[in-house]
Amino acid sequence: MTHSNPTRVSAELFDGQSLLAQPVCLELDGEAARVVGAEAPAAFALSSLRVSPRVFNAQRFVALPNGWELVCAEQPALARLPQASSSEGPVAWLEQRISVAVFAVLATIAGVVAFYFVGLPRLADAVATRIPPERERTFGEGTLRTFDTNLTRPTSLDTETLRQVRAGFDDIRKQLTPASSARLEVRDSPGIGPNAFALPGGVIIITDQLILTCSVDESIAILAHELGHVRYRHALRHLIQESGVAALGTLVGADASSASLSASMLPIVIAQAQYSQGFEAEADAAGFAMLRRAGWSPALFASCLGKIAARGKLGDPGIASYASSHPPEADRIARAEAAARGFVPSRPPKRPADRVEAEPENASAPVPTTDHE
Amino acid sequence: MSGAERAGSAEQESSSGAPRAPEVEQRSLSLVFKGNARDYFRLWIVNLCLTLFTLGIFSAWAKVRRKRYFYSHTELEGIPFEYLADPIPILKGRLIGVVLLALWYAGTHFSGPLLLGVVVVGAVLAPWVMVRSAAFNARYSAYRNLTFHFAGTYRGAAYRLLEAALISFVTCGFGYPWALANVRRYFVARTSFGGVWATYTARGGHLARPFYTMVGGAMLGGAVVGAMQFGSARLGRSVTPTLLALYVLYGVGYAYFQARLGRLNWGHSSLGPIDFAADFRARDFIWLYFSNAVAIACSFGLLVPWASIRMYRYRIARLSVEQVGSLSDFVGESRSAVRATGAEVADLFDFDLSL
C-alpha cells in the first residue's frame, strides 16, 4: 500500500489477443502506473505509457509496454501521461479554443483573398514569362484544331471582305510592341455565333457571324481588343490562374467531395470568371490605344458591342455570344466612347463612312452587311 | 464535459453487454457516431488554415486529425475505432501525388508525348498505389487493440485491374458491373481483422441492376434535356435551364448509384461471424447530396464540415452490424509485434495516397 492517494482512471483493458474487454482501474501514483482488476495485475513505469492525442471529448487510448491497451473516457488525469504524438498535442489545443476558430476563419479568408488577388496573378506573370513563345504557340495550334474539328467550318465570306478584314488586322498588329507574329483565322460558326477568341501564342479566331453582325471596320475594333489579349499573353496567364484557383478549390473542398455534388465548385467558377473580367478591361484599354495609334476610332468598338448586345436581346441562339462572355457591356461601351472623344479618325480608308455612333436599334436591320462595297 | 459523461456511460453499458459471452449466437451490435458539426468545424478550420499557410505541407497532419476524429467518434459496442497512422508517410504519398498531378496537368495542356508518358506510368503505378494505400489504411486502423491487415499484391491487383479494363472495353462499358465486382472482391477478400478474413459475395449480376438503371435513366433524361435544348434554341431562349437540367440529371444518377452500390457492397460483405447491412435509400442520398451542395456553395465552403458530418452520420445510422457467431475467432498477434512490422515497412514503401 502506498502512502499517497493515487489518481484512479477507470478503463477497459484489451490484451491484444482477443476482443474481450476487462474492466480495470489504472492507478497513477507518482512515477508508477498500476493496472488493477485485470486477471493478472501489472505495474509499469509511468514514462513507458503512451496516451493517444486528444480528440475533443472522445475516449482515449493508453498503450502499455506489454502490448495491452486501455480505453478510457477523456479526463484531466490523462495529461500526466506521456503523449504518443508530440505534434498533435498543440493542434488539439488549438482546436479547443473558439477564439482560435474565429481567428482561423478570418486568417483563411484573408489568405485566400490575398492569394487570389495578389499571389496568383503575380505567380501567373512569373510562370508566363518563363514559358517560351514557341511552346505557347503549339498549345494555341492545338486549341485551334479542337475548334476546327468540333465547332467551326472554313469561312464563307467573299474574298474582298476577307481582304479588308486582314488589311485592318495587319494595320493594328503593327502597333504591337514588340512586333507580334499574331495570326488571324476567320471561321464560320453558327453554333458559336458572333464572337472572337485570342488563343495562346497569338492565334486569333473571328467568326463570320461577328463580321456580318457588325461591319468590317467594327470587326477590326474587336480584333484590336483580341490583340490586346495577345499583348498581355492573357490566354496563357488565364490558364495558369485557373489552375491555381482549381488547386485552391481542391484544398478547401477535398472534404466536400464525399458529402455533396460538385456544386461546391460554383465559387470556383465565379472566381475564375472574375479574372476574365479583369483581363477584358486590360485588353480593352490596350485595344483602344492601338486603334487610335493606327488612326481608327475606338467608337467602332462601342457600336459593335451595342449591335451584338441588341442581337442577343432579339433572341438569337448561341451559347457564347460575344456580349455574354464579356459581361458588363454598358461600362465597356461607355469606356470606348470616352476613349474616342475628341479623336479624329484617319481610317477606315476609301470606304463609305460608317455611322460611327450607330444606335443599337440599327442592329435589328436584317442585313447588316450593307456598309461595305 | 457532457461529451465525456456520455462517453463514460456508453462505456459502462458496453462493459455489461460486451461480447465476452461466446454463447451468444445472434444479435445486433450497437454502432453510433458521436461527432458533431460544431467540434468538427473547429478541427476543420484549424486544419485548413494551417494547410494554407504551410503551402499544403500540413495537409498530412490534417488528414491524421480528420481520420482520428471520425474513428474516435465512431463507437462499436461502446468502444471507438483507433487510427494509428503517422503523418510523415502520408506527406510522402502526397508529395508523390502532387508531382504526378503536375505532370498530368502539364501533359494535358502543353505536350502530347509527355501526356502519353504520364498515362503509361500512371497505368503501371495504379495497382501499386491502390495496394499500398489499402495496406496502409488497414495496418493503421485498429479496434479493441487488434489491427486490420491487407494482403493484396501488386501482381494480383494489376491482374484484376487489367481484367476489369478489358471487360469494360470489350463490352463497350456494359460489362462494367462485373469488372467493378471483381476488383472489389479482390480488395475485400484480402483484408483481415484479428486473423479473420473478410468476404465479398456480390457478383456483377448484383451490381448490374443499379448500373443499368442509372445508365438507362441518364439516356432517357438526356434525350428529354436534348429535346428541351432543341426547343429552347428554336424559341431563342437562354440555355441556362438546359445546363441546370443536365446538372440535376447527373446529380440524381450519381446519388442513386452511390446509395445502391453502398447498400450492395455492405450487404454482401462479412467478416467471419460479423455480417453487415446498409439500408441506404437513394432518395435520402439525392436529398443529402443536393442540399449539401447548395449549403456549401452558398456558404463559400464554410459549411463543408457540417455537410461531411451530416453525410457520415446518415451512413452510420443506416449501417447495421450483426453478430451471427462466436467472436472468439478473432485473435491477435500482440500489438507490439504489429507495430514492429509496421515500422519496418514504413522506411521505404510506407505511404498513403488516398484522400
Image (cartoon, coloured by chain):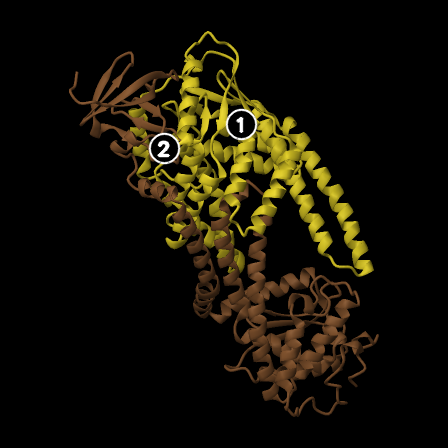
Q: Nearer the viewer, residue A181 or A75?
A: A75
- Left or right: B344 in relation to A201: left
Mark 1 neighbour density, 10 Å: few (under 14) some (14–19) many (20 or more): many
Between marks 1 and 2 in the image, the one whose residue lies nearer the viewer: 2
As drawn, the label of residue B185 is 1
Across and down, in percent, residue A66 comes to: 25, 22
Q: Are marks 1 and 2 in contact (CB under 8 Å)?
A: no
Mark 1–mark 2 Cα distance, whole angstroms, equals 26 Å
The yellow-tinted chain is B
Q: What element does badge 2 sit on?
A: loop
- Left or right: B266 in relation to A211: left
Three-letter code for the amino acid on which mark 2 is drawn: Leu
Mark 2 neighbour density, 10 Å: few (under 14) some (14–19) many (20 or more): many
As drawn, the label of residue B84 is 2
The brown-tinted chain is A
Q: Residue at x 52, y 40 (%)?
A: B308
Across and down, in percent, residue B286 comes to: 64, 38
